[in-house]
């Protein structure tokens, strides 16, 4: 019997967040309890509206709660050069079919975790502000968390600054709280998510599904491809966020190594950098399972199957 894993997706849609929403809603081994949104790729209002529109596009009905509009320290960021002004440019998306939750993101996470009869896995794919605030507000619920599998950081260079990846850079204090939490953490950094490329072959496989959903996703990913080509000179865009969930669905989709991971908070040039001690030089205790190698075929088979499932609903 397949064990179903209850998850909460905390995201900042964002093209790749949208793909993570689809995978979470479609995969038979995942029970998507709810979605929470955090300012990141766009302002909170925009990313929350985008989460609603992705759910409308794929006929997904789960509670969606707005979270933090700003990081713990500093001001909100955005990534219009990558995701566009709406934070999800590139295709015509339907209007929301249901209202946002009255609860805040932290309140919804606490409610869902409390009500669930199993431990819950948190899948953050944006800045970690909501997760950090939940951990600080509800220490009594820490033992109800199975894993925190997050997209963020890198064992190598950054993408938003030379040494910092966007999600961690956008709220390093939140990342520090999560990294020091002692909870079971899995990190999908740029070093692995840059292997999840939406190549022309991948886009052709999605197109061949020949559903309205598939065609809309191809338009979104083509926009994402254009911005990645313009900004990073990458021929194909890395679809970062679903990797963090794919690892929970099938642990064989990535190779994980235990390592100490810390975040730089005060570096003038390196603030937001994840410092991953892969060779044990620091003598620190390992606190994170770091995803290193992606089984690309297995990942895209999982992702495209999710699009097929939702497109036929
Ligand atoms: O650096 C990539 C991450 O930043 C992804 O989660 C993308 O959606 C943006 O949030
Ligand atoms: Ca994201």
Image: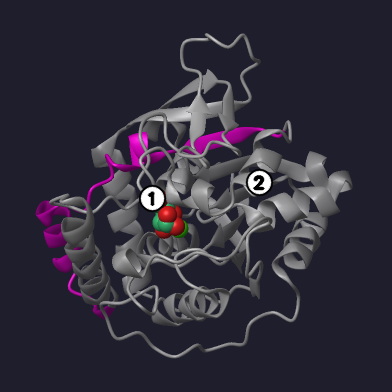
Q: Is mark 1 within 8 Å of ligand 1?
A: yes
User: Is 11 drawn above or below residue 99 in the view shown?
Assistant: above
Q: What stretch is highlighted in magenta?
A: 183-212
* Crowd band around label 1 with a 10 angstrom C-alpha radius: few (<14), some (14–19), many (20+): some
User: Is 156 drawn above or below residue 175 in the view shown?
Assistant: above
Left or right of 95 on screen, residue 229? left
Q: Which residue is drawn at 45% across and 66% down?
A: 78
In the picture, residue 206 is in which quadrant?
Answer: bottom left
Left or right of 24 on screen, residue 239? left
In the picture, residue 158 is in which quadrant?
Answer: top left
Spot occupied by residue 189 in the image (x, y as percentages of width and height)? 42, 38
Cα distance in 3D space between marks 2 and 1: 17 Å
Query: Which of the pair 303/51 is nearer the observer?
Result: 51
- Kindly state the secondary structure of the residue where label 1 is placed: loop
Residue bearing mark 1: 160
Residue bearing mark 2: 173
Q: Can residue 283 be seen in this view?
A: yes
Residue 198 part of the magenta segment? yes
Q: Which residue is drawn at 62% across and 66% down?
A: 36
């Amino acid at each position: 019997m397949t064990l179903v894993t209850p998850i909460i997706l905390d995201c900042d849609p964002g093209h790749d967040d949208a793909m993570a929403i689809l995978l979470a809603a479609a995969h038979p081994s995942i029970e998507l309890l709810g979605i929470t949104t955090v300012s990141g790729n766009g302002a909170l209002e925009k990313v929350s509206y985008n989460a609603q529109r992705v759910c409308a596009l794929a006929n997904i009905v789960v509670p969606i709660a707005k979270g933090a509009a700003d990081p713990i320290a500093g001001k909100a960021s955005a990534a219009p050069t990558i995701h566009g002004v709406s934070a999800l440019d590139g295709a015509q998306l339907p209007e929301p079919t249901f209202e946002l939750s009255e609860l805040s993101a932290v309140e919804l996470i606490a409610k869902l975790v409390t009500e669930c009869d199993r431990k819950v896995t948190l899948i953050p794919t944006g800045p970690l502000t909501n997760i950090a605030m939940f951990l600080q507000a509800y220490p009594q619920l820490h033992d109800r968390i199975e894993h925190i599998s997050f997209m963020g950081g890198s064992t190598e260079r950054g993408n938003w600054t030379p040494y910092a990846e966007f999600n961690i850079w956008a709220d390093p204090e939140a990342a520090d709280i999560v990294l020091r939490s002692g909870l079971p953490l899995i990190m999908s950094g740029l070093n692995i998510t840059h292997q999840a490329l939406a190549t022309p072959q991948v886009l052709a496989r999605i197109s061949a599904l020949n559903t309205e959903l598939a065609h809309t996703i191809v338009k979104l990913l083509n926009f994402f491809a254009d911005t990645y080509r313009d900004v990073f000179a990458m021929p194909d865009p890395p679809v970062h966020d679903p990797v963090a969930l794919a690892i929970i669905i099938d642990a064989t989709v990535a190779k994980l190594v235990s390592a100490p991971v810390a975040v730089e908070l005060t570096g003038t040039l390196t603030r937001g950098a994840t410092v991953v001690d892969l060779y044990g030089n620091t003598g620190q205790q390992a606190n994170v399972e770091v995803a290193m190698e992606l089984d690309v075929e297995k990942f895209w088979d999982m992702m495209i199957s999710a699009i097929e499932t939702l497109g036929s609903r």
